[in-house]
Structure formats: structure tokens, C-alpha cells
Amino acid sequence: MDLRQKLFALFFVNILFNLTSCAADTKGSIAKASLFTQVISKYYYVSTIAKMNWFQAVHFCRKLDSNLINIASKAEMDAITNFLIANGLVNKRFWTSANDLEEEGVYKSISNGQPIAYTKWGDNEPNNVNNEDCIEITAKNNIFYMNDNDCKPLLANMPYTICERENPEDFIPIKAEAREVVPPNCSVKKLLELCQSMGNIMNCRD
């Protein structure tokens, strides 16, 4: 096999590798992204598959390249309330990213380490009964309020999970139920650049 044939073979091995990586990366990204639904300016995944303690919920969201919901404004609270009611979830409770594990009474978001910007406490909440340090949202009369809960409660008292993510640069919204991520190494331009880098052995052009 002469040098030209070796380069030719190497070129196609590289293309095959890129296409394989592309397929794997895209499949994983689509699988994660398609779970999320846009509500106003954020994307949420409401998981009612299983109840979790707060620490498990944090880990669960991060496995999906996201964070526990950080309710930053009245508009966001109203929007997520309407979304949960519209989807028949008003009778369920959900973890948020807020907690006062670091300092009692100072609630911060695990997502960014900053004090939470908005609160909507239920009656006589937070009450810190039995050292409740993690914040959930729970509904009363079809309105969701914040409540402090034990971070590791018994299963019967465990909330469900809402994960949130911003709209990343490589996250292209198509529809709420079908989104696609195109990793950088999947582009035609990338393959053309690879082709050209092999010395124009296939007469590639711009």
C-alpha cells in the first residue's frame, strides 16, 4: 500500500470515527433534551417516576445536565404553578434548589450558591420542625407555596423532583416534545476540514 492509499484509508477511518461519535453524542443529548419542556424562559423536567430525598434529587438533575428548580421570581412561580396544575400535578410536592444547610435561616440555591431571590411561604412557614433545611413546593387550594422539609424524609413524605436548565448554545429548540442537539464534531464543515487537512487527497474543495 503506497502513501496515497494509506492516507486515503486514514481519511475514511477518521470520517467513520467522527460519524460514530456524532451518533452517540447526539443520541445522548437528544434523550436528555427531549425530557424538558419550555415554560417562559427556562426548560423544566418534572419527574414523578419516583420520590427522592433532596440529595438524591440534586444528583438526579445533575445527571441530566441540569439543576433542581430555582424559583427566582413571582412570574416563574406563577408559571410553574400553572404548568403543574395543567398537567394534573397539583396534589404532588416537589423539591426546589433552596436550602439553609450552611446557615440556619439563610436560604441559598444549590444551583448557584446565592441567596434565593424569591420566596412564597405557606402559612407559618418556614417552621424548621425537626431541623427542616430543604425547601419544597406544595399546593393549597390550587396555589403552590414554599415549605421547609427534612432533606432526608421518610419515603411517604418525600417530594418528587423538578429539574431546570437554561437554553444552552448548542441546544436548539424545535418543539417542546422534540428537540435536538448538534454536537460540534457532527457538522459537515468539520468533515470537510478533516478532508482538507489530509492534503486534498480526494480533491475536496470549499
Image (cartoon, grey):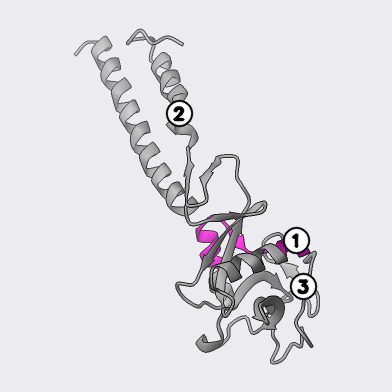
* Residue type marked 2: Ser
Establish if 100 lies above or below 16: below
Q: Quadrant of residue 101?
A: bottom right
Establish if 174 lies above or below 1: below
Establish if 12 lies above or below 151: above
Q: Which residue is mark 1?
A: 75
Q: Which residue is mark 2?
A: 187
Distance between the alpha carbons at the discs numbered 3 and 1 = 20 Å
The image shows residue 36 at horizontal and vertical percentages of 53, 56
Q: Tell whether position 76 is magenta.
A: yes
* Residue type marked 1: Ala
Please report whichever mark, 2 or 3, sits nearer to the chain's N-terminal start: 3
Distance between the alpha carbons at the discs numbered 2 and 3 = 44 Å
Mark 3: give few (<14), some (14-19) or many (20+) Cα within 10 Å: many
Q: Secondary structure at mark 2?
A: loop
Mark 1: give few (<14), some (14-19) or many (20+) Cα within 10 Å: few
Q: Which residues are magenta?
A: 58-77
Evaluate whether residue 68 shows in this view. Answer: yes
Q: Secondary structure at mark 3?
A: loop
Please report whichever mark, 1 or 2, sits nearer to the chain's N-terminal start: 1
Viewer-closest of 192 and 102: 192
> Which residue is located at x 66 percent, y 83 percent?
149
